[in-house]
Image (cartoon, rainbow, N blue to C red):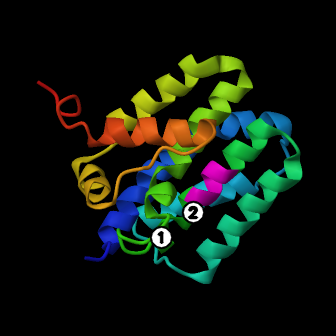
Amino acid sequence: MAISDDERREVARWAAASAERGLPLYEALAPSDTRPREAIQIARAFSNGATGRSRVLSRIAVAAHRAGREIGDPVGLAVARSASLSAAAANIHGEATIGTLGHILGPASYTALARELAGGGQGAADEEIRWATQQATPTLRDLIERVPPATPGRGRLAEIQNQLDIALRDRVHAEPG
């Protein structure tokens, strides 16, 4: 089964909101570099109905990714990758494709990592995961349930992504009441 454009738009909406939460950390390091902000803006435009899956989206996502490599700071790198992946949401492939879950969870996971690295510690990452989980719509959760779960990997980003994946699949705590 394929991922629909409506689902891609839902992912982009959630991803842009997640990435935007880390943007002040990046802009404090590089106030004149607009590439991550532009990636978030185009993700938001796509989520609101702008035509997507175009070269423009890809070009802006790559530019934000490049900004992360150029900044030379782990916090800035994480924020830029979050923004880049939000713009790339329009190009997510089928749910069984390798890397799909990482592309969906990447913006929120990288923002959580950035907040942790910026001095907030694990508590800041946990707070970001809670926020991202609370913002996830039923459509997004349904899509995530169709994608194979995260496999525990090495490194802090993999731990955060796994924690977020588990939280998003937990419907008992997701629905009010």
Range drawn in magenta? 81-85
Q: Mark 1 falls on what kind of element?
A: helix
Q: Is residue 21 above or below residue 138?
A: above
Left or right of residue 131: residue 82? right
Q: Is residue 174 above or below residue 61?
A: above
Residue for point 58% across, 58% down: 85
Residue for point 62% across, 82% down: 55
Residue for point 45% across, 32% down: 129
Could you tell me the amino acid type at mark 1? Ala
The reply to whether the C-beta atoms of the residues labelled 1 and 2 are less than 8 Å apart is yes
Q: Label 1 neighbourhood size at 10 Å, few (<14), some (14-19), many (20+)?
A: many
Q: Which residue is mark 1?
A: 90
Left or right of residue 120: residue 94? left
Q: Mark 2 falls on what kind of element?
A: helix
Q: Label 2 neighbourhood size at 10 Å, few (<14), some (14-19), many (20+)?
A: many
**What label sits on residue 87 in the rendered view?**
2
